[in-house]
Amino acid sequence: MNEQLAIHQVVSQWFRQVRPQILAGRKQGLEIENKTSRLDLVTNIDKETEQFYRQQIRQHFPNSKILGEEGAKEDINSAEELFWVIDPIDGTMNFVKQGRSFVSMLAIYHKQQPVLGYIYDVVADQLYWGGPGLGVYCDEEKLSEPENISLKEGLLGVNGPMIMSNYRNLQTVVKQSAGARIYGSAGIEFIHVLRGQCVGYLSHLRPWDYAAGSILAESLNLVVKTIDGNILDVVSSEDVLVATKRAFSEITALMAAK
Amino acid sequence: MNEQLAIHQVVSQWFRQVRPQILAGRKQGLEIENKTSRLDLVTNIDKETEQFYRQQIRQHFPNSKILGEEGAKEDINSAEELFWVIDPIDGTMNFVKQGRSFVSMLAIYHKQQPVLGYIYDVVADQLYWGGPGLGVYCDEEKLSEPENISLKEGLLGVNGPMIMSNYRNLQTVVKQSAGARIYGSAGIEFIHVLRGQCVGYLSHLRPWDYAAGSILAESLNLVVKTIDGNILDVVSSEDVLVATKRAFSEITALMAAK
């Protein structure tokens, strides 16, 4: 626990340190490139923000290994001490098109075990952070565990392409919920589930999309696994579902491979 | 113009006046009823807020006719002078489940012509207002006209059931955009389009859902009509599309009845 809070003392400073360069960088005009498709963007600010975190990690925690969305991808299983997962800008399309509803995320593991997760809502200047034994905070405010509501009682965050293709029966799931929401950033969707504003969130995610959120969700007694009920290994891209216990069971039953 | 600003002087006070009772009402516990379905909610706060507006209108503008979501529904064509459209809480599901992403809206007409529109983001405490000849403001900040971008350059706000049923080819439209968003409140979606954060928004809307937003959108040179290109009459429920000029043409072409 002391170790965990000692790390937090250092890391929690970084987000507000990097914020001005993210906001100013967007105002100055972004250099935007496509990665895998025209809908998968990376900007100079994604890269610069990741570099900022990498420098901080190297300086303060030199024996770390790092998996970064925009840089070298080391493997959690090769890490002997600290392992870091960086998503410098999550929701890059929102960042580019809206200038809001994007976050910056870090996840920290020690000998493969989760230590701390961070989701920083850059525009709102709110830091969601926590880890095993700590619970979850928004800045100084301790979040309470979301009520264990059922699917029909809550809004469900989803992924646009999955709802359009009715991926594994997803439309039936949505129809049993109180409605679908699409916010376009895994971090923003995780925040909604952490706050009890959505009953769950389902999407195909890469490790940097789900690492921080899953540490926080588990610290609030939410369930976060693949839709087949497998544990997230921080290595694979997966169909990830985070939800209340009740909704998790209901959704996975509806989406069970036939 | 003087008449318009004289009305605005009075009306602009109402939103911050009613805000505390909306926020306190939710904290105290809502009385929630279903209207047409389990997904179409009304609360005591919807009703009380509408009553608040009706009292203010009667007091300050006694010769008005009123169309309210939760009350008497007079017809714009019967109004000899001022006509008001009230949506006391738009995004009631968000209001109930999330405590955010809902708005309160008013639209004002004089002899059937638009005069002023108001979308009040209650939690953010931001009032979007404007009308013909005025442009659109967020509080004191004058919004610039959104760039006339094409569909592929922007995010598209949509309605969940319509995207699931691929209503009139909507999935093809979404695939040509930069992605779909679902926020669950017409007013919140209109704000995104007014701010250029979405290239357009499409949904099946009732007059109180679209009246204020369409007055504001037209004041920023956006197009807002039915998806068949018909003018909104503030009487009928319609498939409403608000978008940049370019995106409006592209979307209506893709959705043209075959």
Image (cartoon, coloured by chain):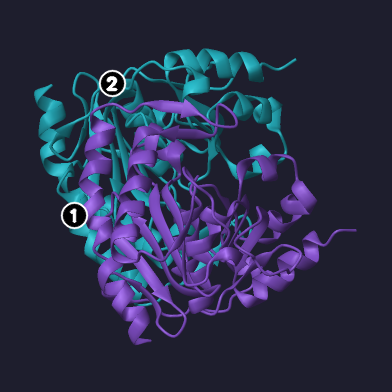
Chain colours: A purple, B cyan
Amino acid type of the residue tagged 2 in the rendering:
Glu
* Residue drawn 67% across the image and 25% down it: B172
What whole-number distance in Å separates the C-alpha atoms at marks 2 and 1?
26 Å
Quadrant including the C terminus of chain B: top right
* Residue drawn 35% across the image and 43% down it: A100
Judge whether residue A241 can be spotted in this image: yes
Q: Is residue A116 above or below residue B162?
A: below
Q: Which residue is mark 2?
A: B145
Q: Which residue is mark 1?
A: B16
Quadrant including the N terminus of chain B: top left
Callout 1: SS: helix
* Residue drawn 79% across the image and 63% down it: A254
* Residue drawn 34% across the image and 60% down it: A57
Give me the chain letter of mark 1: B
**Residue B83 placement: quadrant:** top left
The earlier-in-sequence mark between 2 and 1 is: 1
- Circles 2 and 1 on the same chain: yes
**Residue B170 placement: quadrant:** top right
Q: Is residue B53 left or right of residue A89?
A: left
| Whole-percent x, y for residue A183 in the image | 49, 47
Callout 2: SS: loop
Q: Is residue A213 left or right of residue B65?
A: right
Judge whether residue B40 can be spotted in this image: no
Q: Camera-side residue: B73 or B102?
A: B102
Q: Is residue A46 above or below residue A9?
A: above
| Whole-percent x, y for residue B243 in the image | 45, 23
**Residue A238 placement: quadrant:** bottom right
Amino acid type of the residue tagged 1 in the rendering:
Arg
| Mark 2 neighbour density, 10 Å: few (under 14) some (14–19) many (20 or more) | some
